Image (spheres, rainbow, N blue to C red):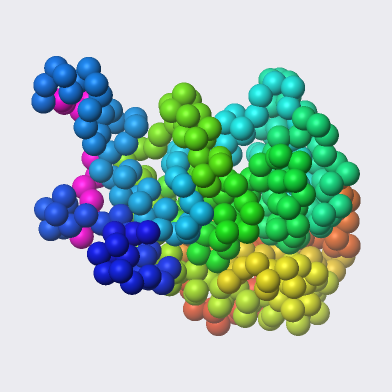
Amino acid sequence: MSKSDESTGRSLGVQTRLVTSGRDTVAQKGFVNPPVVHGSTVLYPTAEDLLAHRGEYTYGRTGTPTTRALQDALMALEGSQCAGVGIAPSGVSAISTTLLAVLKSGDHILVCDNAYRPTRNFCNDMLKRYGVETTYFDPMIGNGIAEFFQPNTRAVIVEAPGSQSFEMPDIPAIAAVAHERGALVIDDNTWATALYHRSLDQGVDISIQAATKYIGGHSDIMFGTIAANEKAWPQLSQAIRLLGVCAGPDDVFLALRGLRTLSVRLAHHQRSALEMAKWLAERPEVLRVLHPGLETDPGHAIWKRDFTGSSGLFGVVLKPAPEKAVHALLNTLTLFGMGYSWGGFESLVIPFDCSGYRTATKWAPGGPALRFHIGLESIDDLKTDLAAGFAAFNAAC
Ligand SMILES: *Cc1c(COP(=O)(O)O)cnc(C)c1O
C-alpha cells in the first residue's frame, strides 16, 4: 500500500500510484522530486549508533533517499504480491543477480527458448561453469513443461512475449507446474512492464524488467529492476547485498522520472504500434506480423487473458526477398533509426534471425524478419517513411 492509500484509506488506481508513490514532501523540503544523492559515507551521531549500524541509511551501496523513492514507486507498480524490489545497473545485471540468488552448483534450470539472448549466454557460460545445468523448452508448451522437470530443477525462466519472435507463453499454467515441483518462476517482464502485465499476481515469483527500456523511456539510461514475492525476496535481497549490486544515482533518478510518465507513454506506444502492425499486415510485401495484440496472432487469447495492454515492439516477416532488398528498405528509412535496444521515445528497426541460437524450437519464418519499435512520432509520418522503404525494397527485388 502506498503512502496515499494509508493516509486516505482509499485504494488508488495504478496510474495514480505511479504519480504519488515514493514521494515524501517533508523530507524533500517541499520539492516534488527527491534529491539525487551522490553518496557513499553516511555519518552516525554517536559511537553506539555507528556500531549498531543504526539509522535510516547506513551506507551508499545499501540505499539512499533517491533509491528509496524509486523502490517505493516500483513497489506500488508491481502490486500487492510484491515483497521487495531490487535495483541493478542494467537489465542483464538484474537477470544474472537473480540467477545467482536462486541457484547453486548441482541445480537445473528450465529456460524458454525465446529468452533474451544474453540470458541464454549467462546460462550457457557462467551457470555452466558453476555446475548448473540448463534445459531450453518450447515457450508454447504450457503444462507440457512437466516432463522437463528433474528432481534438481530449481527455477523456470519465462518471457512474455519472447525476445525477437514474440511467442506468448501460458505463464499461469507453467507456474502451476513449477510450484507443484518446488521450483521458482522468473519472468522477464520488460515488454509489457508491470503496468500491462502483473506477473507477480499470476504465479511469477520474481519479475525482472530491463528499465533501460520503457521505465527509463528516453534511451538515456542503463537500469534493471527485480521485483520478488514473499517467498523469493529474502534470498534475492541477500544476493543483492552479497554481490554489491547497486546503481548510479543519476540513473536511479532518471528511472524514477521515467516511471512518472510511463502510463501515458505506453498508451501511445500501444496505440501507434497496433495501428502500424495492422497497416503492415495489409502490405503486399509482408507475410506475417508477430504481435500478440493482433487478433490473428497465435498468442492473442493468452495475451487477452493475462495482459491489460501491449507495448510498442513487434516483429514482421517479409515475403522471401534478397538481402539487398531488405537492406534497401532499411537504408531508405529516415525516421526509423537502426540500433539495438528499444523502449525510448524514438522509432527503431532491426533485421533479426533467431535460427543460429534457438535449440528447442526451429526458427523458419519463411522470409526475412524485422523488429520494429514504434515511438512517439506522428504515425502518418512513420507510414510515409515505411512506404518509401517498401518502394526501395520492391525496386531491389
Ligand atoms: C534489453 C533487454 C534486457 C537487458 O537489458 P539491459 O539493460 O540492456 O542490460 C533484458 N531482457 C529483455 C527482454 C530486453 O529486451
Instruction: Give the dominant element type of the magenta stretch: helix, strand or loop.
Output: loop
Residue at screen point 58% across, 71% down = 308
Residue at screen point 55% across, 66% down = 196
The x, y position of residue 112, in whole percent, is 76, 47
Q: Is residue 73 above or below residue 101?
A: below
User: How many badges with numbers are in the image?
Assistant: 0
Q: Nearer the viewer, residue 132 or 167?
A: 132
- Position of the N terminus, as image quadrant, is bottom left
Report if residue 353 is visible in the image: no
Left or right of 99? Residue 7 is left
Residue at screen point 71% across, 64% down = 315
Q: Nearer the viewer, residue 84 or 119?
A: 84
The x, y position of residue 161, in whole percent, is 69, 59
**Residue 247, image quadrant:** top left
Q: Is residue 150 above or below residue 139?
A: above
**Stretch in magenta:** 32-44
**Residue 248, image quadrant:** top left
Q: Any magenta on residue 40?
A: yes
- Position of the C terminus, as image quadrant, is bottom right
The x, y position of residue 285, in whole percent, is 80, 74
Residue at screen point 59% across, 29% down = 100
Q: Nearer the viewer, residue 317 or 27?
A: 27
The x, y position of residue 50, in whole percent, is 19, 20
**Residue 394, image quadrant:** bottom right
Report if residue 185 is visible in the image: yes
Q: Any magenta on residue 82?
A: no
Left or right of 360? Residue 292 is left
